[in-house]
Image (cartoon, helix red, strand yellow):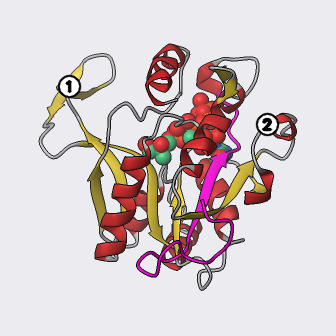
Amino acid sequence: MKDNATPASPAIPAIAVIVPAAGIGKRMQAERPKQYLVLHNKTILEHSLARLQQVPTLSKIWLALAEDDPYFADINFDQSQIVTTKGGTERMHSVLNALQQIEPYKYPWVLVHDAARPVVRQADIELLIERCITTGDGGVLACRVRDTMKRGELTVAHTVSREHLWHALTPQLFPTALLKAALEDAIQAGVYVTDEASAMEWAGHPVLLVEGHSDNIKITQPTDLALAAFYLEQLI
Ligand SMILES: Nc1ccn([C@@H]2O[C@H](COP(=O)(O)OP(=O)(O)OP(=O)(O)O)[C@@H](O)[C@H]2O)c(=O)n1
Ligand SMILES: C[C@](O)(CO)[C@H](O)COP(=O)(O)O
């Protein structure tokens, strides 16, 4: 990871990193926010930061934290590469708060990765970077849906075709100025987005689908912990 705005190589412009880590992890029902739960002797946040640190083309990290976060001070990571920013009510607010600290002329691209996704592979991140920088379009790591998909509440309303249907993952990588404008406009228009790509789509920008590994899970509920621990064993 680069610790300044100098690009790793002339071919790849400086890429800022935003890690939204200001959630409370309601669905995890744990005694602390899930990004601070420990797997293999490290917090999930430390694992996620370590995955990003493995990518030499990434620059500084803007880490969105809850205002009353009492845990971050104890994490074991080179904090010289981290700028902490204020988390917001929703994930999109946390990301926008961080974006507003990043100067597009210094960091023309920004990569957003959930703190709750500690198993992302370096090769997948590098593939996303290569595809986006080559085309000039932003994009998301994604994996194809494998199950038959149903829409409904208590009974099936209808089956959703799984052809060309994907799970959007993170990282998501976009031109910094475009993403900032898209998120600001979407939030101003009262549009609730759960990922950066949704704001870019709403603003009419193309979003590349870059196929990544399905083990890049977002730790969300208790049963995800054992699975993430297993996947992490393969990586660390
Ligand atoms: N206001 C928020 C909400 C979420 N996040 C971050 O966005 C990522 C993905 O969000 P999610 O999995 O929904 O985390 P939580 O919001 O903590 O989970 P829950 O919805 O169960 O409370 C997490 O790393 C979380 O810390 C954030 O930075 N700011
Ligand atoms: C950004 C994301 O991880 C892509 O799948 C997802 O939208 C986050 O959703 P959450 O409800 O904030 O976990």
Q: Residues within 10 Å of mark 1 (few under 14, many from 20)?
A: few
Front-lying residue, 196 or 61: 61
Q: Is residue 178 above or below residue 147?
A: below
Task: Tell whether circle 2 marks a residue whose Cβ is less than 8 angstroms from ligand 1.
Answer: no
Q: Residue at x 59, y 80 (%)?
A: 104
Q: Indicate whether residue 138 is drawn in magenta.
A: no
Q: State the residue lying farthest toward the bottom.
A: 105
Q: Residues within 10 Å of mark 2 (few under 14, many from 20)?
A: few
The answer to whether residue 219 is left or right of residue 213 is right
Name the residue beneath numbered marker 2: 75
Q: Is residue 177 above or below residue 196?
A: below
Q: Amino acid at mark 2?
A: Ile
**Mark earlier in primary sequence (2, 1):** 2
Name the residue beneath numbered marker 1: 147
User: Does residue 83 appear anywhere in the picture?
Assistant: no
The answer to whether residue 174 is left or right of residue 58 is left
The answer to whether residue 33 is left or right of residue 69 is left
Identify the secondary structure beneath mark 2.
loop
Q: Residue at x 33, y 33 (%)?
A: 214
Q: Residue at x 63, y 49 (%)?
A: 20
Front-lying residue, 204 or 221: 221
The image quadrant that residue 102 belongs to is bottom right
* C-alpha separation, residue under disc 2 versus residue under disc 1: 38 Å
Identify the secondary structure beneath mark 1.
loop
Q: Amino acid at mark 1?
A: Asp
Please state, as top left, top right, bottom left or bottom right, where the N terminus lies in the image. bottom right
Q: Which residues are magenta?
A: 1-25
Q: Which mark is residue 222?
A: none
Ligand 1 lies in quarter: top right
